[in-house]
Image (cartoon, rainbow, N blue to C red):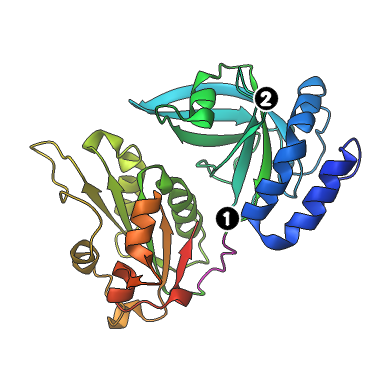
Amino acid sequence: MPPSGPFPQFLRAKLTASSMSGTQVAVAAAVAGVGAYALYLRKSAGANATDKPSLASFGFHSLRLHSTELVSHNVKRLRFELPNATQPGGLSLTSALLTISIPAGRWLPVLRPYTPVNSLDETGFVELMVKHYPGGKQSSHLHSLKPGDRLTVAPIKGLSWTPNKHPHVALIAGGAGITPMYQLTQGILNNPGDKTRITLVWGVNTDSEIFLAEQFGALQKKFPDRFKAIYVVATPESSSPHPKGFITKQILEDAGLIASSEKNKDIKVLVCGPPPMEKALKGAMSKPGVLAELGYSPAQIYSF
């Protein structure tokens, strides 16, 4: 339900109508009015701080950038302050933040979803990992932000995760599509009550773009029986230990992700990456994709 209070009536109506049609429709319907509300938030930043988790329900929030860190040649970690320093954001597992900005020289707002990468239990902060794409409107804007600058965001829900619903989950990511997979991996493995096994396959362009290798390595060491990560590099270094190329049927077979395998009974496959990668994996009406060739049904596959 759209928030009450100083919220543009025409935008509230659009969001009410679109909320029944999923995230993509809601985003499209909000474009017409969100620019005006973003400007309003710039004038009233900080007014929405409460004693409750600030991102637990739908609404627009202005977050102050606390610090930035360059984690690879084209990826930045952006750490934002939550309105209430003593509370976590309140996001559910696999949720994302719709970022809203009006970059210099533009009349219309730019909207892009990004998945937080820090622990959802952390109080006072939320972190985004943003890959800069040449000519990318939102990524260029986010990379230009300096500590003290503000960003308007709105929480959006993803897959509703239920611990132990699936004994095994396969996470297949390409490039910056790794962020929802990282959030989910942390949430599963750090929950003592969730015993789900995870196989991660992450495709990148170069070895330097495996910017979460240290974090995944630590999780693999701590949970050797439950978590395995495989990296596939399109243009690897001569000394790279990783498979060369793209995520293919053979790569997934080698990772043990054949649907007919007994250990993959009731497996769930989650996919997030560039459109060409997703199309190759999921296929089209005229041609089955790699996952269908491996024996997976559409009901077993979810795309972020």
Residue at 67% from the left image edge and 24% from the top image edge: 107
* Disc 1 to disc 2, C-alpha distance: 34 Å
Residue 259 at x, y percent in the picture: 31, 78
Q: Mark 1 — residue?
A: 93
- Left or right, residue 232 beside residue 214: left
Residue 73 at x, y percent in the picture: 33, 25
Nearer-the-camera pick, 268 or 66: 268
Q: Which picture quadrant has residue 133?
A: top left
* Predominant secondary structure, magenta span: loop
Q: Mark 2 — residue?
A: 107
- Which residue occupies the extreme front position in the image? 286
Q: Is residue 94 above or below residue 289?
A: above
- Which residue occupies the extreme left position in the image? 238
Question: Which residues make up the magenta segment?
Answer: 159-164
- Can residue 224 be seen here? The reply is yes
Which of the two marks, 1 or 2, is nearer to us in this view?
2
Tag shown at residue 221: none
